[in-house]
Image (tube, coloured by chain):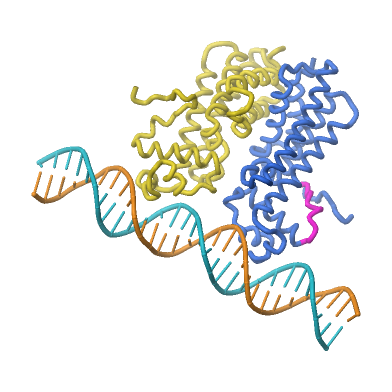
Chain colours: A yellow, B blue, C cyan, D orange
Amino acid sequence: MSTAEETAGGETQPWGEVTPDAARRLLIAAVEAFAERGYHATTTRDIAGRAGMSPAALYIHYKTKEELLHRISRIGHEKALDILRTAARREGTPAERLADAVSSFVRWHAGGRTTARVVQYELDSLGPDARAEIVGLRRQVNAEVRRIIEDGVAAGEFDVPDVQGTTLAVLSLCIDVARWFNVNGPRTPDEVGALYADLVLRMVGAGR
Amino acid sequence: MSTAEETAGGETQPWGEVTPDAARRLLIAAVEAFAERGYHATTTRDIAGRAGMSPAALYIHYKTKEELLHRISRIGHEKALDILRTAARREGTPAERLADAVSSFVRWHAGGRTTARVVQYELDSLGPDARAEIVGLRRQVNAEVRRIIEDGVAAGEFDVPDVQGTTLAVLSLCIDVARWFNVNGPRTPDEVGALYADLVLRMVGAGR
DNA sequence: GCCGAAGGTGAGCGGTTGCTTAGAGCACCT
DNA sequence: AGGTGCTCTAAGCAACCGCTCACCTTCGGC
């Protein structure tokens, strides 16, 4: 009851862990603004305004504008990694686990497009230290997908000449959903997830 | 001889059509700056400085900073469309044409990553009118790929349940190369192009 | 030798940026 | 009643932004 992770609306709200209420409102406002206009085109006044506060209130909860992006990026990557881990470590054949990983990963990028956009496309706006931390999380994301593909190859279920290259392509395909997906478009996140899971299984030669 | 399209270095230079020499230098400087820092984080002083000129010189050749981005985006999209058209309209089986289209499209995104990054990821930084024009070019890009896939389906060579969805996925896969490709990484643009052509043929079920 | 057009510069204008400061309001403890 | 944090605001500072303007140089045509 305390930290609900979903709203009735539909978009996931994984910001339950951001504890002072005002800090969470500011962070959600920042996600929306960054997703719409990009990090550099967003002003601290805009963020504070969306949260219904004065510009100075931002600096009570965050040291700089960049710290906001850093927090958003870390929490988002941890959520993405969690989704992949859950799918990768469930029981089932490699094909089932890969399909599960891709469809849920894509659902997250499509359904939470606002968040995913910031998380995936504003990495370069972070300073060196923060970026290094996020790059570490990305390596874990890569490793998780790679492991499923390696398992499939080892089991003789997949036919993949270049495991790392294919891992990169699969992740790239999923991540780019955040760029083109349109909430008012013809497809639901579920449909895109199902389509992409099928395409990825073909890429690894799982349909024999 | 007059408008060489390639340098000995390797990266394509399709800016031969930008006619006053100073205007071309400014435009190339802008491409580099936009690719590194993003449009909004780039200052006109930075662009002019890279071109070895004073900040005011920019406004002799371009009305605004946005006009620079618009020009870059239009020329880049026309080049990308040209690459796809050439591959789509050559003779050969649909599988050969699709592989050709994907590998050359990917080569362009990987080899000219600097340009491709600006072209593909700064669309939202354009104003409404300029964006509308570029969106029109993107629709033509989509149509070109879609036509190859439809031809393959009609010929019985491809097995594709969702033609438009697969078209979107193929384009998305190619475009996202501009985001992750690293010039100092382990793969050459040619290698990525060949890998991706193979993956896409699997996606459309062309390997029987 | 003079001229006008074209390309370039140094200085700077109005506006906006990220961020700071001084202080107000308010719940809570003793 | 008086102190003590905590949250938030109004005002504003120094720096920087896109862009302009008055002026200088170069150069082909006559």
Total marks in image: 0
Question: C13 or A127, which is in the foreground?
Answer: C13
Magenta-drawn stretch contains B14: yes
Horizontally, residue B116 falls left or right of residue A51, namely: right
Where residue B40 sits in the image (x, y, percent)?
Answer: 58, 50
Where residue A19 sits in the image (x, y, percent)?
Answer: 35, 34
Question: B68 or B54, which is in the foreground?
Answer: B68
Q: Quadrant of residue B28?
A: bottom right
Question: B37 or B67, which is in the foreground?
Answer: B67
Residue that appears at 63% across and 64% down: B55
Residue that appears at 53% across and 18% down: A87
Q: In the image, which residues are magenta? A: B11-21
Check the image and report above or below for A57 versus B207.
below
Where residue A107 sits in the image (x, y, percent)?
Answer: 56, 23
Check the image and report above or below for B88 versus A194.
below
Quadrant of the rendering where the N terminus of chain B is positioned: bottom right
Q: Quadrant of residue B120?
A: top right
Check the image and report above or below for B58 versus B5.
below
Horizontally, residue A68 falls left or right of residue A105, namely: left
What secondary structure do most residues of the magenta stretch adopt?
loop
Check the image and report above or below for A67 versus D23.
above
Where residue A101 sits in the image (x, y, percent)?
Answer: 57, 20
Magenta-drawn stretch contains A137: no
